[in-house]
Amino acid sequence: MELQDLLFSQGFGPRRVCLGLVQHGLVTVNGKPASDPHAEVEPENLSFTVEGKPWTFHAKAYLMLHKPVGYECSQRPGAWPSIYTLLPAPLRQRPNKGATPGVQAIGRLDQDTTGLLLLTDDGTFIHRMSSPKHHVPKVYEVGTAAPVEDDQIRRLLAGVVLDDDPRPVRAAACERTAPEALRLTLTEGKYHQVKRMLAAVGNRVTQLHRSRIGTLELPADLAPGQWCWLTPGQLAAVSQRGK
């Protein structure tokens, strides 16, 4: 792959911009200054810098973000800033086959919800993870306005009816973690599902945090607002249903 094409594929701008980055001495490859934008490079695991910032080639981007409170999962946010502003420009500009460039969030978390969010530019992966047939468990830590009652847990596990679907929606697992907190596992992804389920059993969500997708746990050392690449093992864990 030509160096300018590699830079383009990683989101560093149109090819003419990538050509200029090399010609102006702003790119190093494997620690050495690059001068020829048409030089052939082996992309796999290639390390390079652009304007002094290190980067590693990824054919497809698979990321996790610790979403903080006060951010919208939208490219066109309203009252709150977009989660995409938390990412470096190349990740927001990566070319893909979709109408919108860059990585896209898989599902959404409300502005007042925190926790594990996945992003990718792999359209097939987005479709598979978003499909209701996939049934990947998602674990939420829920703070409640009133003490969690045994009957509320029983009803969440048995299934509650939401106003947009006559079919009951069930929690795959539910346990009280404190007098006014519970851990809820869902395998569906309806709009505001956790909040609506708690409302259906006579309680109200005061805090909501997604701690796990599949068997992938949000790392304790990934602070709110930070992101990282998924390792192959973490990527595999995303699709696992666990026990």
Image: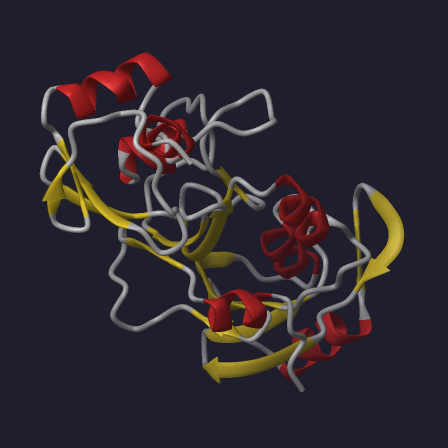
Up-down relation of residue 22 to residue 72 (above or below): above
> Residue pushed farthest top?
16
> Residue pushed farthest bottom?
243
Q: Picture coordinates of residue 160 (x, y %)?
A: 79, 62
Q: Picture coordinates of residue 8 (x, y %)?
A: 38, 27
Quadrant of the frame with the N terminus: top left
Q: Residue at x 42, y 52 (%)?
A: 63
Up-down relation of residue 87 to residue 152 (above or below): above
Q: Residue at x 67, y 74 (%)?
A: 152
The answer, for residue 16, to whether it is visible in the render is yes
The answer, for residue 147, to whether it is visible in the render is no
Frontmost residue, 91 versus 157? 91
Q: Residue at x 9, y 39 (%)?
A: 52
Frontmost residue, 239 versus 107? 239
- Left or right: 88 as drawn, with respect to 192: left
| Quadrant in the picture for residue 154 | bottom right
Up-down relation of residue 50 to residue 63 (above or below): above
| Quadrant in the picture for residue 238 | bottom right
Q: Picture coordinates of residue 186 (x, y %)?
A: 67, 66
Q: Residue at x 45, y 21 (%)?
A: 76
How did the renderer colour the structure? secondary structure
Frontmost residue, 183 versus 86? 86
- Left or right: 51 as drawn, with respect to 117: left
Image mark count? 0
Q: Picture coordinates of residue 78 (x, y %)?
A: 41, 22
Quadrant of the frame with the C terminus: bottom right
